[in-house]
Amino acid sequence: MVHSSLVSLGLYIDRQETLIEALCEAVGPLGNVIIPSFSYDVFNNRIFDPNRSCSLVGVLGDLANKFEGSVRSWDPAFSVTAIGPDKHEIVEMKVNRAFGTDSIYERLYEYDVNFVFLGVDYKSLPYFMHMEAMLELPYRYPKEFTGKILRDDLIANSSYVHYVRDLDLNFKTDRTKIGYMIDSIAQVTKTPLPCGEARIVACREIDIIVRSAVSKDTHALIKFL
């Protein structure tokens, strides 16, 4: 799964498909490329259309959505786009939430994906929210949202659950400490780039490190103000 900021890397590509093609070539014909394409539509009273809703988390998501053969999940907030032989299984939504048991992000663990960071650090990793849901950490709770999804040219009502922050608690997300732990403990592959750095680390390694950290401090992923 690729998290990126092409601007911070100083990448300006004449033919936009080039980067997606390079990622597909890197994983080979049996590998899959997964890219976040979060729209947050359900939180903003917008109709989610997997073919038209823009990715608000980087241009790579929009490039992936336009790439031939890609498939986008029906998630009206935290959609992901997949390319490869397992793309349909990866994006299948079995529950009406992005994170937690039976979610797409739990499937990332089952597939033992690698997280790739291009010009971004660990703060950009949504898997932390999945861990907060799985571990039922006390500063988040499940909240139901209602929205609309465009399916087969018809607008359908949808129900969606997200683990939101408890606003009565004065805190902010802070991945600094866990990021240091990942760099120190996990097998992180780092590659210098002209304007930044690329990192690759296995999903399951991050999962183990987060579980260990939270077992000692339930606030390991946040900072109280």
Image: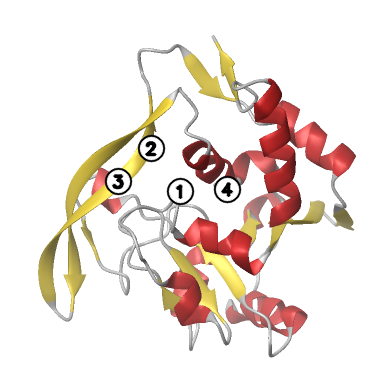
Distance of label 2 from label 3 (alpha carbons): 7 Å
Q: Position of residue 93 (x, y in %)?
A: 36, 66
Q: How far apart are labels 1 and 2 at the CA level?
A: 9 Å
User: Do labels 1 and 2 touch, CB within 8 Å?
Assistant: yes
55 horizontally vs 75: left or right: right
Considering only order in the chain, which callout, 1 or 4, is on the residue closer to the N terminus?
1
Q: Earlier in the sequence, mark 3 or mark 4?
A: 4
Q: Mark 2 or mark 4, which is nearer the start of the sequence?
A: 4
Give the alpha-carbon distance from disc 4 to disc 2, as whole Å.
Answer: 13 Å
Q: Residue at x 33, y 59 (%)?
A: 95
* Residue receiving disc 2: 163
As helix, strand or loop, the secondary structure at mark 4 comes to helix
Note whether residue 188 is visible.
Answer: yes
Q: Amino acid at mark 2?
A: Tyr
The residue closer to the viewer here, 161 or 123, is 161
Image position, residue 77 (x, y; %)? 34, 53
Q: Which residue is mark 4?
A: 127
Quadrant in the rendering for residue 117: bottom right
Q: Position of residue 12 (x, y in %)?
A: 66, 65
Q: Amino acid at mark 4?
A: Tyr
Colour approach in the figure: secondary structure
Tag in front: 1 or 2: 1
Residue that badge 3 annotates: 161
Residues under numbered marks 4 and 2 in contact, where contact means CB atoms less than 8 Å apart: no
Q: CA distance from mark 1 to mark 3?
A: 10 Å
Quarter of the picture containing the N terminus is bottom right
